[in-house]
Amino acid sequence: MDPRTISILDYTYELPEEKVAKFPLEDRDSSKLLVFKNGVIEEASYKEIHHFLPPKSLLVFNNTRVVEARLLFKKDTGAKIEVFCLEPADQYADITSAMLQKDKVLWKVLIGGASKWKQGMILQKEVQHDEQEIILSAAIVERLSDCFLVEFNWEPADLSFAEVLHLAGQIPLPPYLHRHAEESDKERYQTIYAKSEGSVAAPTAGLHFTDSVFKNLGVRNIKTDFVTLHVGAGTFKPVKAEVLREHEMHAEFIDVNISTIENLATNVWDNIFAVGTTAMRTLESLYWIGVKISRNPIIKATELEVDQWEPYESGVTAGAKESLDGLVAWMKRNEIERLITRTRILIAPGYKLRVVKGIVTNFHQPQSTLLLLISALIGDDWKKVYTYALEHEFRFLSYGDGCLLFADQTSLITSSEVEVLDAPNCGY
């Protein structure tokens, strides 16, 4: 199947408003878990997830941290202007370095009430913290095709932009919750292992995991590791095009340690499960980056970004281990400990999984690229899974329940489809 010919209307379902979880449960791991394997559905809770995962499995989590990306300014006239911080300007190497900027920074943003904010006008926001006054100023630098470029300045200048957002901003809850963030969301809209600041949306599949769940995974000899994909606002972007070829996938930063890639290469013959669609997109992107390197061992780091259609156009297919080993070898030659690049990978029906054998995830919106990813994993059985969840009181979307889905055999790459690259081509 060529995913570019897919009609998004074939990936919709009726989602009543009352099925959307507006608030999380009091206990994270009490959320319901739907387990789907070999066409069979079982019900459990996240407290029991270790019983359903094969021993020696490797669970990979996204440890990104949601930033308080929603800033509210008020003009002297009383008019309110909302600024939603998307990602740093292109001049910064990555989100982390941009977040650590002091005194000023350039950021791509969406603006609510943009007509009220004329170019040249400087908006200010004052915040009191520990008897200290923080003054944040914002000015429009340029109007881009789908957003604005804004320069932020602040005092005291020795604060980082991450600290300023934490003090002056609000947690950006998904728009489909139709409510403002509350104080409790600062803690509940973060995973317990959130570390790297930069997301404007939580990797919600991980919200259900607790210290107790991690302990039970360890007892069953189920390993864990972490990658970083900073979730952008594009994760909420519906597919409005009639066919998928007209949909532009958003780019997101990934950041992965070399030790994690070595761990993936070691465990690739076992069961690797992604916790969330963002972790899955990261893991599969690593494979395609390895393929790029196999083609060009002297490739530059700036040339590693994965395009949305690249997996469907590649004429060369390597084994997962060969690709990941080649990536590790390239990083060692270039003395790189952390791989930082961007990915636009689109995983849709027709895609063959290279690294991942299953996913732990929430229930997603109709006509979304996330639902397409689920269909790539389990085929048309996504309809069976979602119908069951709707009929058995599962809660949907970010604060809702979740599922453990084992990949259908037809979605996995087979040995006959793999051209194992010669060692010299992998750059060993």
Image (cartoon, helix red, strand yellow):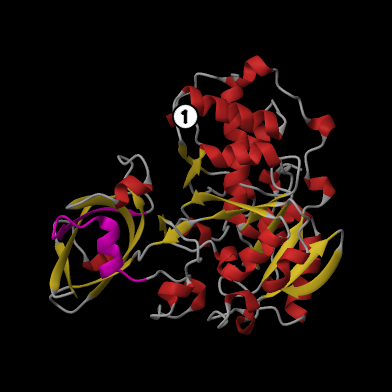
> Furthest residue to the front?
219
Instruction: Give the position of the C terminus as an image quadrant.
Output: top right
Q: Residues within 10 Å of mark 1 (few under 14, many from 20)?
A: few
Residue positioned 49% across, 22% down in the render: 333
User: Amino acid type of disc 1?
Assistant: Glu
Residue 186 image position (x, y, % from top left): 41, 73
- Can you say whether 176 is above or below 381 in the image? below
Q: Is residue 154 magenta?
A: yes
Q: In terms of image quadrants, where is residue 413?
A: top right
Spot occupied by residue 340 in the image (x, y as percentages of width and height): 45, 39
Question: Which residue reaches farthest top?
Answer: 424
Nearer to me, 82 or 258: 258
Q: Which residue is mark 1?
A: 303
In-image side of 313 versus 166 (left or right): right
Residue 118 within the segment the image draws in magenta = no
Which residues lie in the magenta part?
147-170
Whether residue 170 appears in this view of the structure is yes
Classify residue 409 as left or right of residue 283: right
Residue 399's place in the image compared with 62, above or below, is: below
Locate residue 150, reporting x and y percent.
25, 54
Viewer-nearest residue: 263 or 285: 263
**Toward which corner of the image does residue 381 lie, by quadrant?**
bottom right
Is residue 217 positioned above or below 293 on the image?
below
x, y percentage for residue 235? 52, 58
Labels in figure, total: 1
> Can see residue 307?
no
Asked if 274 appears above or below 366 in the picture, the reply is: above
Rendered residue at 50%/56% (across/down): 63
| Quarter placement of the N terminus | top right
Identify the residue at image location x=24%, y=49%. Answer: 101
Secondary structure at badge 1 equals helix
Q: Residue at x 17, y 73 (%)?
A: 75
